[in-house]
Each structure stands twice: as C-alpha cells, then as structure tokens.
Amino acid sequence: MSAQSKPVNQAPRERAGAIWLRYAAPLAFDPLAARMIPWFFAAAALFGIAGLYIGFFVAPTDAQQNEVYRVIFIHVPAAWMSMLIYLVMAMWAAIGLIFNTRLSSMMASALAPTGAMFTFVALWTGALWGKPTWGTWWVWDARLTSELILLFLYIGFIALQAAIEDPRRADRAGALLAIVGVVNIPIIYFSVFWWNTLHQGASVSLTSAPKMAATMLTGMLVMTLACWMYSIGAALWRLRSIMAEREGISVVEAD
Amino acid sequence: MGSLLLRVMLRDLALAWRQRADVLSTLIFYVMVVSLFPLGIGPEPATLRVIAPGVLWVAALLAAMLSLSRLFAADHADGTLEQLLLSPHPLTLLVLAKITAHWIASGLPLVLMAPLLGVQLGMQAADIGVMALSLALGTPVLSLIGAVGAALTVGLRGAAVLASLLVIPLCIPVLIFGAGAVDADAGAAAYFSLLGALLVLALAGAPLAAAAALRISLD
Amino acid sequence: MPTDPLLTAHELECRRGRRRLFRNLAFGLGAGQMLQVSGRNGSGKSTLLRSLCGLTCPERGEVTWRGVPIRANRDTFNAELMYLGHAGALKDDLSAHENLLAALDVAGRACSAEATARVLDELGLAACAALPAKLLSQGQRRRAALARLWLSRDTPLWVLDEPFVALDADASAALRRLLAAHLENAGILVLTTHQEINVAPARTQHLRLDV
C-alpha cells in the first residue's frame, strides 16, 4: 500500500495568506464578531433616533398628504435594505460556493431572515401609507408587487435551507438558488413594471411621493444608515448562533 | 452525441408513455382547475372572457409545478440519476434532453388542451390562437425553470411543494408576458419577442443550473 | 508485482451530517489490483465508494486517477469508470434488455443489440429479457443490473457496492470469474462486501472501516 504524505489538497486560505482570510475560519471569527455586535447596534440606535427625529419633527409637513407621508421614512429605507441585503446575501453565498469557505455560506444564511424582515416591513408600511392616502390597504403598484415577490424569494431561500439536513448541501443549494434569484430579479422587476403600466386602470401608485425637500432626503438616508447598522449587527448575532450550532458541537466520531 | 441525446429523450418519452396514467393526471388537473374559476367567480360570459387568458395561464403554471416531481425523483430513487452524473457525456446536455422529454409529455398536452378550454371560457378565435402560441413558447420556459427547482429539492421530504415555492416567483415574468399577449391585440408581437427572449435565456442557463443543482443534491 | 498506483486516496475524510465516518484514509491501487472494503452497516462503505467516484465531495483529502485529481477532469475519469451502487440503476418500466442498452448508452459504451442479448442469455435472463424489470425477482434484477459489467471489460476502474447481494451460487460464481478476469486484464476493482469472496487473494488489499 503506498500512501503519499505530501498534502495535495491545499485550501485557498493557506495559499493566499491574506490577513482577512485568517478570520475566514469560524472559530477565529467568533470573538471578533462578539466584540463588533454591540457597536453596530449602538450605531443603529443612534442613527435611528436621529433619523426618526428628522423624519417626524424636522421635515416639513406635506401639503397634500399631511402627516401620513412620514411613513416613507421607514418604508423607503426598508425597501432599499431588502434589495441590498438580497444582493449581499447572494454575494456571500456565491463566495461560499466558489471558494468552499464555510463562513461565507453561514453569513448568507444569517442575512436572509433580516432581509425578509425588511421586506415585510416595507410591505406593511406601504399598506399603512396606502390606507389613509388611497383608501385601500393594498395597491398592486409595481414597487409593492416587486417587494412581495422579493419576499417570496427570501422565503424560498429560507425554506430550502430549512428542508435540507446536511449543512453542506443546504449551503450549496441555497447559494445556487440565491444566484439564480439574483439573475432573475431584474427580469422579474422589468416584467412587473411592464405589467403595471399596462393595467393603468387603477392608476394608483406609491411613486407619487411628495416632492423631496432636502430634509426629507437627509432623513431617509439617515434611517437607511440606521437600518444598515442594524442589519450588520443582527446578521453577526445570527451568524454566531449558527456557528455555535454547527461548529461548537464537537464532531462525533463514528464508533 | 446528438443521437445519444435523442435516445435519452426517446427513452424518457417511452417511460412517460408506459406510465401514462401519471402524465394524464396532470392534464386532467389542468382541466379541473380551469373549471373551478367559473364555479368560483360566476358564469357571466363577459367576466369569463376577460379573465380567461389569466386563468388558462395560471392553471398551466400550477399544472407544470405539479408535474415537476416526475422529472428527477424516480431516477433518484432507482439509482439511474447517479449514473447520469457519472456519464462521460456533459450532464448539462443530458439534463436538457430530459427536460425536453418532460415538456413533450407534460407541457405540450396543456398547449393542445388550452384552445378547447378557451372556447369553454368564451374566448374569441383570434385570441385563442394567440393564447396557444404564448403557451407554446411559455410552457418550455416553465419546464426549464422548474427543472432547477426539482434538481435542488431532489430526495427531500415534501420536495414537490418546496420545488413549486422556489420556482413560482421565478416564473412570474413568463406568466405576465404570456397572459398579457392575449390582451395586447396588435401589440402581441412584442410579447412574443419577450417570451422568445425568455425561452432563449432559459435554454442557455437552466440546464446548466439544473446540472449544478443535481451535483449538489447528490453529494 | 510493483506497479505505479493508478487510483490513489490521500488523507480522505468523510462525514455524514455531523458524524465523521472515517479520517486519514489513504491507499493506492495499481493495475490488476483490488480493494475490498468491509465494515459494519453504517460505517461509511458506500460513502467511501461514492467519494472515489466523485459523487460525494470528501470533507478533507483527495482522490486521484492517473495522478490527476478526479474533480479536475471529470469527463475523462467518468469514461474510465463503471460504478454500480446499492440501488442497481434499473428502470422498473423498461425491460432488462432496454435497461442494459440505456445503461451502456449513458456510460458512453456503444454496444450492439446482439451482444447485449448474448450477455443476458449467459446470465440466464433470456426468458425474461423482454419483461419490464418490475416483474423480475430480486435475483433476476441483480443479474440484469450486473450485466453491464460483462460489456464494460475495457473500462479500467470498476467500483461496485455489494455486488454479490441476492445472487445465487451460479451467478456468484460467474461474477467471481468475471472479476478475476477483469483483474487479469489489468483492470482495477474496488468493492464492498459483507462476505469473504476470494476473487484473487494475491492482488487484494483489505480496508476495514470500523476500527
């Protein structure tokens, strides 16, 4: 029996030697993540308070929509985050699939529920805006409908990973699904906007937002930053619990 | 190579023929679902004529989702799927041959049945023609995208429903353009180009994604 | 006889879920050699075979064929591999004959209908070659699945998972003769078995998975 002792399978992290790759091993990353999380939540709280203050006290009242329009300070940042998180999630998933790094895949799984939450918030705040403004709780306008489909994509990703027991298969299958989703999103959005312009009968649209005063834009950007900080904090928190679940439990030897 | 793919496709079609009860049940499902709409909404001819394209398309989408379990599940259970993965021939092309056979057995009957159901819903003759053509272009896309979902969920508990959950959002553009073509009258050509573009994209990307998904699933 | 190893495994480690099945597994097989893998049920024999075929990605380690990692050149490796798993790879609704033709087709081996009919005849399946496989007995199905081996003699690497299951004495003897002939022909064999099969003891390496 001839057994070669030369290691043939060199992981990318050993070859590259870049500093950040040192943290690509989950065990090394955990303490770093633990230190970072409180800072992100603190930043989220600060930006959130500032943003809500601007949105609810500083920004002028809109002539037509009165105070109700202020809901866009939550609706728009949530919608932006829901889109951004899907892209980031797909990016991490793709990295995990291509380079076979476990931490990247876990990050994608950690981001998904936060992204779904923001999508949900965007839909609800859209409804809250629609009711006083247009009289109905839901309008099938292009943006809300696209948000709904995005929610379905998130749910599909989470459901697929939940249905697969083997973590490796779950990571890779989720990654493939996320990549397919990202490729399809432009097509889906295009078709939904097309569909919406066809059926203009209702001509009800949440795009008829009030003209943007500078303060309004500032308020939305600050709120977006708050959501971004929160997302990173929440994702890192979830990442730590995923790591604990997968790596913390020691590997059971086959007897 | 080409004749091998043809043989793979014909073999799958022969299998579908020998299990034709399974295949027929998808078609019967389609007919039943379409009949549910007048029963649920009311038989008013004007209403039915308006909702007909949407109904025929949504029902076709649902029937296509139902038929997805036929694509890889049986092969996975009896071990032939593994042999496909171990073939020296490109898996992408083998998967394409299987998807083609699947569409011929499951999708094409829907296309042929739709005109009859269109008459039942009171559609005009010209509209029926446009509808049939949109289904002919669109159902292959449904099979192609569906194959990716089926490949990702092969062997899982509740795979059929899960695959549908994954695939339905991705099929929404096909639904929109397919059903929209009928209402478009003069502008139908634009819809057919869009459907054609989707078909080309799906042909280019879906078999590759499905092959990758199969390797992931059988790991 | 010392030969350069064609199939090698280095530091192979496989897991199922969280359970590690084996680690630091290594071996090298040259032409005309056989590896017999044994172990209790659930010890990872099938997983090992699947990772040798490239179906399963090992947690750690690597498998090489002719010095090249099998993942690097999948198509070339697959052309030289014949794998038979537990399941037998038979379509229930196809006849034994059609199944054999389909299997060889997918595996990239051209074969005439006469040759396939002859092999099925040799295996005692002439009478039921045209029946759908679901009507065959366990033993007949096993023989129908194994038939493809008789027509893949020029495929160097055979990986067989429990090939002797459900075979009667005659069929077992025929299979034993075929495997011995394959090794004589400079072929390589990896198989799992619960029994002692005595194909070519001089050329056999043993690997036990639950120690």
Image (cartoon, coloured by chain):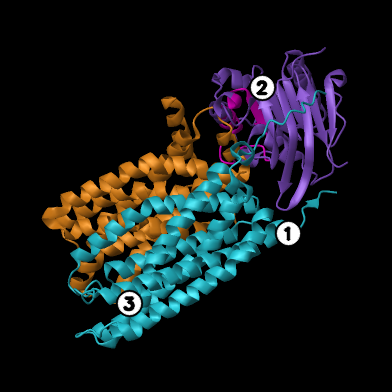
Q: Judging from the image, what secondary structure is the residue with disc 3 in?
A: helix
Task: Please give the chain letter of the residue carrying mark 2.
Answer: C
The amino acid type, in three-letter code, at marker 1 is: Gly
Same chain, labels 3 and 1: yes
Quick check: marks 2 and 1 in contact, CB under 8 Å? no
Residue C43 placement (x, y as % from top left) = 80, 44
User: At 37% across and 78% down in the image, what residue appears?
Assistant: A125
Circle number at residue A72: 3
Residue that mark 2 sits on? C67
Residue at image coords 32%, 68%: A145
Which shade of the palette goes to chain A?
Answer: cyan
Q: Colour of chain C?
A: purple
Q: Is residue A207 visible?
A: yes
Residue C16 within the segment the image draws in magenta: no
Image location of residue C161, percent across then percent down: 73, 35
Outermost residue toward the left in this view: B186
- Circle 3: residue type: Ile
Residue closer to the observer: B122 or B203: B203
